[in-house]
Amino acid sequence: MAGEKKIVPSQSVKDLLRAIPKVDAFLDWIGKDADAPQRLVKIEIRRLLDDERKAILSGKAYAKDDLAKESLLPKFAERLAHRLQPNFRTVINGTGVVVHTNLGRSILPEGAIESLMKVGARYSNLEFDLASGRRGSRYSLVENLLCDLTGAEAALVVNNNAAAVLLVLETLAKGREVVVSRGQLVEIGGSFRIPAVMAKSGACMVEVGATNRTHLHDYEQAITGETAMLLKVHTSNFKVIGFTSEVDLTEMVKLAQKHDLLVMEDLGSGCLIDLSPFGLPKEPTVGEVVRAGVDVVTFSGDKLLGGPQAGLILGKKEIIDRIKKNPLNRALRIDKFTLAGLEAILHLYFDEEQALEKIPTLAMMTMDPEVIKRRGARLLRRIKKELSGKCEVSTLNIESRVGGGAMPEHGLPSRAVILKPLDFSVNELERRLRSAPLPVIGRIEEDRFMLDMRTVGDHDVVELSHCLLQAFEVAIS
């Protein structure tokens, strides 16, 4: 623009810029040492040299030696090593949150992993009916299992529960009214809210009741000739306590039948087993909801079910058939890996003892605190002596969380290994562990780094001890 002064680099800056090596010269320095594709090597060289150029122009103190081969090659090697690491990596979960949304939610059992490997390595009957030799439906591969386990007449699986809710509402209530309690307008992770999902479906939301109390007459007074459905949303990720009331599902079903309406329940973190005998809060099981007479129920596959990410839709055959025919269903369908993992998980539920033992999510939620205590003691024995003088190490009784938007505020008695570095900050320890080749994710409380051993598997203890020693630069024997 006219009148603006141009920035003219000083002679020393110009000399430094001229000293930046060319890409071809840098490639000659490397020779054939870089164990990476040549295209990727060139990309990282250009980015490194561009960063050096920007640093010089920003006024950073520089000498020509900083641009020599001996200075730049180590920088490049570090950048390339970082680039060659997978972006999608496994971590050790020391947070104590069993269904951790940010850390991949539920861990699959070994049988499910084996199923994933089999269908990934070979062709499969994903949409081929082996009995008739004709095109088949991918949904039929798990539909009978879901129906047998819950008593539902039919079932459908899509890619997550938000998609399931969207698909059901778009099919059954587009352009019509859906009555829902004001106290059930939940927000799930990523700021997705029931009202927003309902708006996208084309359904018209009618709120009834108050935040803390909704009665049957609230629903009945809201019913008009435009009403298509009564919706119940299980508030699995928050709790309202005190002066509260909500309408029992069976009463809602009777009211809907009286007015020839549909009833839907969104369970969110749905489960197939009653976990209350293990000291956990009573959650409605999918089977209980189906037996109450709802037309359709939706829930997640990767929360309390303990399987892969999926949205499960169960209900009356006539209703599920209508949902299956919705063109939107194709955009939301699951792939062969989800199907393989889900089928393996569902088979385990036919024996509840087996499910509780082999499905990691259920096993961690119902774990004996004494087992967790012994695991913490095992880790302590591996690191305490080696970290003497570098870190205060101890164990502490704490509480874990179920996570995944389920059983809010319910604490699970657990045991943590506590670390308090003596030569650097706890925040620096957290950074080092998070940046390790096998990242370790814990939590900081009261200026101490805590590793909740409920979510650290027995198979993780040896690797975790190595990560901790490396973070304190202790040689591993």
Image: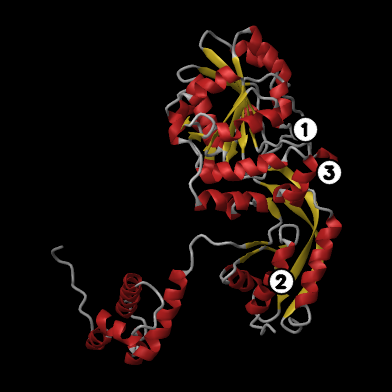
Residue at (75%, 52%) from the top-left corner?
364
In this rendering, the label closer to the viewer, 2 or 1? 2
Q: What residue sits right under mark 2 in the picture? A: 462
Label whose residue precedes the other's in the sequence (3 or 2): 3
Q: CA distance from mark 2 to mark 1?
A: 46 Å
Residue at (51%, 24%) from the top-left corner?
323
Q: Amino acid at mark 3?
A: Phe
Q: Amino acid at mark 1?
A: Gly
54 vs 222, left or right, is: left
Q: Quadrant of the C terminus?
A: bottom right
Q: Amino acid at mark 2?
A: Val
| Vertical position of residue 88 compared to residue 254: above or below | below
Residue 366 is situated, as x and y percent measured from the top left of the image, at 79, 48
The image's mark for residue 242 is 1
Q: What residue sits right under mark 3 in the picture? A: 278
Q: Residues within 10 Å of mark 1 (few under 14, many from 20)?
A: few
Nearer the observer, 273 or 193: 273
